[in-house]
Amino acid sequence: MSSVVNGSAVVVATSPTVQLAQIKSKQRVRDLAEVYTHEREVNAMLDLVPDMFPSEVDPANHDRRFLEPACGSGNFLEAILRRKLVTVTSQRYGRGQRFEFRVLRCLTSTYGIDIDQENVEQARRRLHDVLEWHLHSQLNTRDASTGFYAAVTHVLETNIVRANTLTDAATLILVEYQPSRGNAFLRRWSPLQESEPAPVDLFSMDDEPVQDEAPVHYSLLADNPEPVRKRASA
């Protein structure tokens, strides 16, 4: 099933997904309850939320956030990313940093969690391949700019993670990427699920949210895995 929460699509599959077979092995079915959803069902479910994707009416709709809490090897994630990228073309955004930033916006708003590390690594590879193919199709022989693929790898590591969504939601930290001016992102680190509030202590200050104090250009994301602080004035 699919549902929309706070403007973000949470795509809930009954199982992880792959393209060719519904199971890898009977052992994995026993150990992980792993039964894959067919591509036909993946697309049928995504068709239920057309307003979450770019369209002729809203071709720049690339920042709606999706979370697949049992992403498997990435069928849902790949289908989501492909749909987002449809309107990210060199004709619309040129062939420079503006284009690359739009591609990354499609990726930074796509999240996946799985209990199995093998699935996580395969999902990351599949999304990386989708982006690489898209750049080649739009830029032909032109290479990506310095830092682009490092940023892709970094985002895949923060957005596609190994965890048990049912038991780890309150402790699992995900990074929200907010697009900013100058082809940059402001990031915020927060738990997937807010824990119960602690008793109020009038003599202590609330913890400040973990977030960037200054935007980070996309080419520098991999070089700045921790929150960026503002530089002191000279």
Image: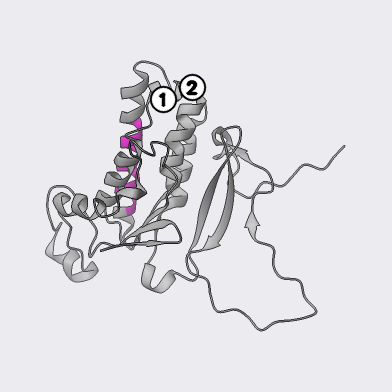
Q: Position of residue 197 (x, y in %)?
A: 60, 78
Q: Crowding near pointer 1: few (<14 within 10 Å), some, many (20+)? A: few
Residue at far right of view: 234
**Which residue corresponds to the image point at 24% horizontal and 67% vertical from the top-left?**
32
Residue 139 shown in magenta = no
Q: Position of residue 166 (x, y in %)?
A: 37, 72
The colour style of the image is one colour
Q: Which residue is mark 1?
A: 92
**Which residue corresponds to the image point at 77% horizontal and 41% vertical from the top-left?**
231
Q: Is residue 181 above or below residue 89?
A: below
Q: Which residue is mark 2?
A: 96
Q: Quadrant of the C terminus?
A: top right
Give the residues drawn in magenta, as a range: 120-132
Three-letter amino acid code at disc 2?
Answer: Gly
The label on residue 149 is none
- Left or right relative to 55: residue 226: right
Residue at far bottom of view: 199
Q: Nearer the viewer, residue 142 or 181?
A: 181
Three-letter amino acid code at disc 1?
Answer: Arg
Q: Secondary structure at mark 2?
A: loop
Residue at far top of view: 141
